Image: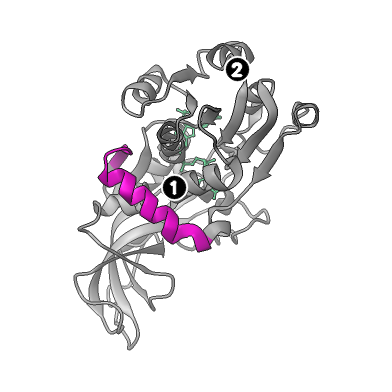
Amino acid sequence: SKSINLKQRPVGTPTLSDFEFKELDNDLTVSEGEVLLEAKYISVDPYLRGRMSDAKSYVPPFKVGEPISSGIVAEVLESKHEDYKKGEFVSGLLEWKEQQISNGEGLQKVDKSKAPLSAFLGIVGMTGLTAYLGLHEIGKPKKGETLVVSGAAGAVGSVVGQIGKILGLNVIGIAGTDEKIDMLKSEFGFDHGINYKTTDDMKAAIEEAAPNGVDIYFDNVGGPISDAVLFNINQFARIIICGAISVYNKTEIPMAVAVQPFLVKNSALMQGFIVRNYADKFPQAMKQLSTWLGEEKLTYKETIVEGFENTPQAFLDMMDGKKKGKMIVKV
Ligand code: NDP
């Protein structure tokens, strides 16, 4: 059994040489109150980039020479824990190890009959909750309003746009390839899509797609795309700052000047959030997401990469946009 460790802190865009594989002690003895877990699906997420740096954040940085961790769905191979039985599946923030011992802390049971195992890392997991709660708690959507979503073809963005449509909004998505733009419209029901990589004047393109202005902006990317959206916001617009992937690999964060004047003159609200701020609302949000899934009002896309050894490359490809929907590794 192997682990994947942080070999060194990446500077700028991470590369494979920032990760290393380590052979683990094969004798994993389960003590009283513990379980032996085998990783089945590993989530690779943008926030892991932040943890690879040593800057202060809401989660402590990864340690150099130690395993990376992220959301993982695992099978219980052996149990001496009263809450878990052999053969059950769990999810939790676990280490990038093929097998590991856990004392059960932070683990949640996964019910295979409710959704495919991988979905617990996406639509009925952290990214689905992020989409639902960010949009509702900060966006306070009202029927007929216009919603712009950046990072729209990704795990969070694709769900935000679909919820927008369920609630009767006019939805515009921004993503990085024409294929993704087609997918937004044909599979997820977005009204408009803008490819930011082939559009010279983003401000004009948003104005054209949103002739009545933008009421809600769900921001996953930050940077110039977000400036272009801010030029088009309406009075009392709500701007949900979910992420800023366009700056995660930057060694210096660029200063934005568009924000203040547009917020002032439109009496707009801008608020950042971390999904676990809303932990008390997880059960209700999960119930709604599952109901919509069951009713086929909501769908989801996954890009599944096979092989534990391909986890670092999957992370790099996810950051680079080389995937659609939620990027997941099947161990
Ligand atoms: P995605 O599935 O959206 O994957 C990331 C995508 O970002 C890439 O596929 C790429 O797609 C796009 N991207 C990469 N670089 C840039 C760039 N320079 N400009 C614009 N787009 C870029 O990831 P997630 O859905 O998991 O996460 C989306 C955002 O939400 C991230 O910022 C993440 O940090 C944040 N997040 C926040 C949470 C919270 O609690 N606040 C929880 C979960 C996620 P493309 O081809 O379109 O460029």
Q: Position of residue 222 (x, y in %)?
A: 62, 33
Q: Is mark 1 within 8 Å of ligand 1?
A: yes
Q: CA distance from mark 2 to mark 1?
A: 29 Å
**Vertically, is 273 above or below 233?**
below
Label 1 belongs to which residue?
127
The kind of residue on which mark 1 rests is Thr
Left or right of residue 172, residue 200 in this image: right
**Snapshot quadrant of residue 215:** top right
Residue at the (31%, 39%) spot, across then down:
302
- The reply to whether residue 104 is in sight is yes
Say what secondary structure mark 2 lies in: loop
Residue at the (48%, 40%) spot, across then down:
15
Q: Between disc 2 and disc 1, whose residue precedes?
A: 1
Which circle, 2 or 1, is nearer the viewer? 2
The kind of residue on which mark 2 rests is Asn
| The stretch drawn in magenta includes residue 169 | no
Residue 223 bears which disc, if any?
none
Residue at the (46%, 37%) spot, across then down:
160
Q: Dominant secondary structure of the magenta stretch?
A: helix
Magenta span of residues: 279-304
Q: How did the renderer colour the structure?
A: one colour
Residue 212 bears which disc, if any?
2
- The reply to whether residue 252 is in sight is no
Q: Position of residue 73 (x, y in %)?
A: 32, 59
Left or right of residue 313, residue 74 in this image: left
